[in-house]
Image (spheres, rainbow, N blue to C red):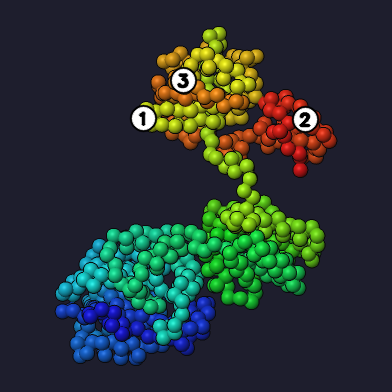
Amino acid sequence: MTVTNDIKYVGVNDHAIDLFEGQYDVPNGMAYNSYVIMDEKIAVMDTVDKNFTHEWLDNLANALNGRKPDYLVVQHMEPDHSANIVNFAKNYPDATIVSSSKAFTMMKNFFGQEFEDRRIEVKEGDTLSLGKHTLNFVAAPMVHWPEVIMTYDSCDKVLFSADGFGKFGALDVEEDWACEARRYYFGIVGKYGAQVQAVLKKAAGLDIQIICPLHGPVLSENLGYYLNLYNIWSSYGVESDGIVIAYTSVYGHTKKAVELLADKLKANGCPKVAVTDLARDDMAEAVEDAFRYGKIVLATTTYNAEIFPFMREFINHLVERGFKNKTVGLIENGSWAPLAAKTMKSMLEGCKNLTFTDTTVKILSALNDESKAQIDALADELCMDYKAQRDETANKNDLTALFKIGYGLYVVTSNDGKRDNGLIVNTISQVTSSPNRVAVCINKDNYSHHVIKQTGIMNVNCLSVEAPFSVFECFGFRSGRNVDKFENEKDNLLRSDNGLVFLSKYINAFMSLKVEQYVDLDTHGMFICTVTEARVLSDKETMTYTYYQANVKPKPETEGKKGYVCKVCGYVYEGDELPEDFVCPLCKHGAADFEPIS
Ligand code: FEO
């Protein structure tokens, strides 16, 4: 096979193999690729598996057409590519072996020799001229062994990519590239996403027209497609919309739950539900799917106070490959002490950026009304986005969307001529940059609104994530008309040029604002202001409303209580009915800001 005028394919197909690398099922066999670059000097790129010595040497001799090779470039020492280095060296005693330092050490370990008298050791950035072709060596450690180098031929613009861009399957079988390339990638290279990313960055600087991997077809068209998939895979991104359900089932009850969930997910608009029985289906295919989709449900039985062995093996595969950036739902089954969900969650503990669903399905031996309801809830949770994307299923009047607007939290300080005042505000944003103008919205019920409307100045103090709950209690839950919020700090107050207080701690910046325009918004007033002074006090992150809710606001003590809890400050009202006109004694928010204790 001809790759370019000067580059010939001399690899072999293996249909006798049972398991690649001793574990991967390869129903369509395997290809071990090798290439020859014909120039004034001749370079052979890698050898092949030990079972194909003569076929490969014949292919090579045919391509050489009577000439002798000058170099054997060894990019990777795994035996599927290196097994014939010694045979090559014997057949072509004048040829030089070109490889990385680590690869020569491995040659010593594999073959008892490292070709001291006939070798060139190369590293990142080294080149080897063959005549009009120049080989540029690119270090690719851990893609997928530490000694790996890739080689770029700048004449024909070919990247010899070692295992990168390889796939399962012999070259004489027609099949989809992505399916078997993905299974190969996540099975074999998946752990080394960061290293693949590093190589892709180097590749981005090269003009590549053809990719010649050590397995799978030569890629010469639409390279952007392959590069994009490699980028997604190695950055642990989501390649396809859909949900994977990986399960084990002993007597069929967990399987029944999985089938029910799969039906509900489809009914909820999930575009693809990939179900895999870990005891019976190909484990590498299941691993590939787990990385391909953004959401996964793990369903298994409690077994020996643990989980079923195939699920344990599956989770181990995920963890060792750096599983991350996924939404995970759990279904557990147990006849007397279900422990599977806890075990699965703890196994995944070290994985980064996993979001576990609020719903975990607990099956006690067989499905019942309660566990069926949990499956409904899990399906709803997992399909929230799919439902909202489709006209037929979307709630188009879901005003909780407004809660998704990102807010910072600020203390706005002012002075009524007698004393300093401050309140917590989240509705502040920069509205123009030339000039810098900032809009501040304040509820008319707040004393600060009244003061600022009269004085026309304020300071906006940007709270940082260091601010404790006491800051919110001080400035948020009481009125400056009745209390002096700076009473404890009277002697230490800091002031900006406009004479107003700025906070001495828990802020990363403040701005002094002068009101230029006022917009009456019924319940609120919007002050549109110019910036008269601005100082940055730290590099700490700004406190957002989300951060406050998750990390600062104390968890309400509702354990064992019946009644309602204030969503703003956590105050608990105990009683069956919350009076409509109830006002929180802590933060002064009304009944609308309370929710029943669940
Ligand atoms: Fe194809 Fe890593 O050997």
- Please tell me whether residue 423 is drawn above or below residue 556 in the rendered image: above
Q: Is residue 348 visible?
A: no
Name the element at disc 2: loop
Marks 1 and 2, the one that precedes in the sequence: 1
Is 558 on the left or on the right of 76, as rendered? right
Q: Residue at x 52, y 17 (%)?
A: 452
- Categorize mark 1 by other alpha carbons within 10 Å: few (<14), some (14-19), many (20+): few
Indicate whether 9 appears above or below 396: below
Residue 357 picture location, percent across and down: 64, 53
Tell me the quarter of the image containing the N terminus.
bottom left
Identify the residue at horizontal 57%, vertical 70% (top origin). Answer: 286
Residue located 65% across and 60% down the image? 268
Answer with the quarter of the image where residue 563 lies: top right
* Residue at image mark 1: 434
Q: Which residue is mark 2?
A: 580
Residue type beneath disc 2: Glu
Q: Position of residue 18 (x, y in %)?
A: 51, 84
Residue with the mark numbered 3: 515
**Secondary element at image label 3:** strand
Q: Is residue 428 visible?
A: yes
